[in-house]
Amino acid sequence: MILRTFGWSFVVTALALVTALFYGGPEALFLCLILAVLEVSLSFDNAVVNAKVLERMSEAWQKIFLTVGVLIAVFGMRLVFPLLVVSVTAGLGPIEAVRLAMEKGDVHEPGSYGYILAEAHPQIAAFGGLFLLMLFLDFVLSDREITWLSWIERPLARAGKLANLSVVIAAIALVLASELLAEDSHIVLLSGVLGMITYLAVNGLGSLFEDSDMLDDDVSDEDVGDGSAPLTGRPNGPTTLAKATGKAGFFLFLYLEVLDASFSFDGVIGAFAITADPIIIALGLGFIGAMFVRSITIFLVRKGTLAEYVYLEHGAHWAIGALATILLLSIKWHINEVVTGLIGVVFIGAAFWSSLRHRRRHGVDGPESTGTITSSNDHPTAV
């Protein structure tokens, strides 16, 4: 199970480390390892949320996320995104941005690649912070049968009956951050609003098409009868249910990609405190880190871990709330990435320990997961 799930991650890790060694010698190898550990420690809560969403996706969309989605995570967020930020911020063309990235300038040197990216941190942090804050608020303000930190989750769930409370709280947090923490309040305010809009749009569209799928499923159960009457005008074409599932899957895929981007902001920016070399950052954060996050996600779905350890999802969302707060605070103050990683580990570890106690108290062996993840031989694996 471990080898099948993490096999590709081990292979990619070995290749990335060898590449780093040939590229920059032992120092590059060491920096690559540090960045990989940083990314995995920062992204475990990301993997938990990914697994929860992935369980709602069809087998085809699971495969797309675990292949195409990983490529976007590796090359898009860890390599192309910093180049795009530098290009837009400094008014450079793509080729000039690449040339600047390959120069060995100090991160504190004005005009260097790392310096320009650090200067763009406030708007990046505002976008990612508000996206993650909305995700956290929508979770803790929802009424749930199972609560972890009941002393606060139950009052928050009761307060959540007030319509659009998550938007109100997030908007207040954004206004306070832009006015009290930002030097340029307008750009931070705009970036934060875009983060909120992105969350509401992607999450809302995904929910819309999921509801459409359920409606079509009810119609097919009641009206199709023996299945002789097709649901569409084309007897051999896709059914309405298949189309709706495709749309829902697409928006869930898009939601996961934006979520991954929001999680990776602090890692990408924080990496420049370690090295400004984009090749080493791409190897450590992208190839090694993103691949292990993918493998952890697969492991959680295959083992049904989220159903078995009932508080893990809660711990992940509280870690997301902490990360969102840290991103907003980092608009003004630098917060060491080790602190960010440790906070996430503490929440996940505490939730895991609480889940173990819950299982012992109730004698739960852990239900089977209902999702599917395609194994390496392309046959669906029940999990």
Image (spheres, grey):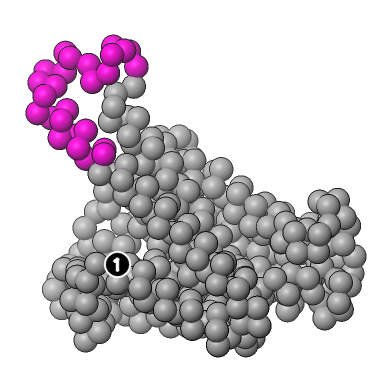
Query: From what the image shows, is residue 45 above or below residue 258?
Result: below
Magenta stretch containing residue 51, yes or no?
no
Q: Is residue 282 visible?
A: no
Identify the residue position indicated by label 1 in the image: 164
| Rendered location of residue 162, percent (x, y) | 22, 71
Q: Residue at x 65, y 64 (%)?
A: 285
Identify which residue, 360 or 348, lies in the foreground: 348
Queried whether the magenta region covers residue 219, the answer comes back as yes
What secondary structure is marked by label 1? loop
Using the rendered image of the protein, determine whether residue 235 is visible from the camera's viewpoint: yes
Residue density around tag 1, few if under 14, some if 14–19, many if 20 or more, within 10 Å: few
Report the label total. Answer: 1
* Residue stretch in magenta: 212-237
Is residue 16 toward the left or the right of residue 164 in the image? right
Residue at 21 percent across and 58 percent down: it is 367
Residue in view at x 54 percent, y 43 percent: 67
Q: Position of residue 272 (x, y in %)?
A: 73, 74
Name the residue rendered at 13%, 73% in the picture.
362
Is 51 drawn above or below residue 251 in the view shown?
below
Q: Position of residue 339 (x, y in %)?
A: 55, 85
Q: Is residue 262 left or right of residue 230?
A: right
Query: Among all residues in the image, which is located at the extreme front?
Result: 186
Q: Nearer the viewer, residue 223 or 50?
A: 223
58 relative position to 212: left or right? right
109 sits to left or right of 357: right
Which image quadrant is residue 303 in?
bottom left
Q: Amino acid at mark 1?
A: Asn
Percent coordinates x, y for residue 225 in the rendering: 10, 21
Up-down relation of residue 60 to residue 162 (above or below): above
